[in-house]
Image (cartoon, grey):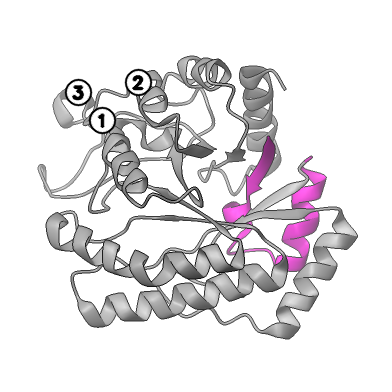
Amino acid sequence: MKLAYDASMFRDSTPLHETIDKVAELGYKYLELAPRTDFFWFYQYPKANSAMIANVRKWCKDAGVEISSLVPVQQWSSPNEQERQAAVRNMKRTIWLASELGVDTINTEFSGDKYNSVTSEGQWYKSMEELLPIFEKEGIRLEIQAHPNDFIESSYAAAQLIRSLNSDNVGQVLCSAHAFYSDGGKGDVRKQILDSKDVLSHVLIADTFNFAGSFGLRYTINPPGAPVTIHQHLNPGEGEVDMDAFYSTLREINFDGIVTNNVFMWPDRIEWSNEKTLKSIKDGLHI
């Protein structure tokens, strides 16, 4: 098992060199490198070059930190073909970055358009036909999650799509903060994990409130009934996810993949947030 830290809370205020040092100071050996403008960014072509890669490798070595995965977000399922082609090009560049960095895993989202899901699914398969052989050739594992507002939000449906690729090189990511979108507001994390256990290789730890709670009014949205997708990434225990069930089910299936601190809500209180979340993870998984 790899215990990693998603350093998104450092993204807008801390250079990458310092971020890597901070991750080590917080008690982690592994960094999950999510989008940031000085390396790669959402939906854009990655700008990092060979010099930057050499620097990152040195900074990680000096800090005693390894990059567990890169986390690109690209519109590779877009119904717009030009946008999809650009996303595939961007993802090829990200695979190159991972290879040059010595990173063996890329985790990402299905993306696409939830209001045009059938076309988005077809576009995703089209992208997979082109990209999966490259992932396999480079020996880089691909892990995918159904993210709120993607063309699929259900963790069960995500597992079906991943299985359909018939590739041992592709696994599923489950995020506890997406639990209520994964099953239409129930938040049955035990069932979600068991339904995906054969493909599950990566979990993200954070809490959230149930968007469907209080008759759909758990979050105040103006105007009422606006078509928005909303959730949070809180410290475990601050929301409504059954974290005890999440942890115990992972123990039950002997989960041995990547476990990531995925809290985003406290960039002004990072050390405090990490102390709470890291303790929750270690206590919950008995590590």
10 over 51 or under it: above or below: above
Q: Which mark is residue 17?
A: none
In the displayed structure image, the side of residue 220 where residue 269 appears, left or right: right
**Residue type at tag 1:** Asp
Residue at image mark 2: 191
Helix, strand or loop under label 2: helix
Q: How far from the left and from the top, in percent, is residue 85? A: 32, 80
**Residue at coordinates 80% horizontally, 56% vertically from top-left?**
21
Name the residue tied to disc 3.
Answer: 214
Identify the amino acid type marked 3.
Answer: Ser
For the record, the magenta segment spans: 1-27
Badge 3 element: helix
- The answer to whether residue 109 is visible is yes
Q: CA distance from mark 1 to mark 3?
A: 17 Å
Task: Name the image quarter holding residue 130.
Answer: bottom left
Q: Are marks 2 and 3 in contact (CB under 8 Å)?
A: no
Mark number displayed over residue 183: 1
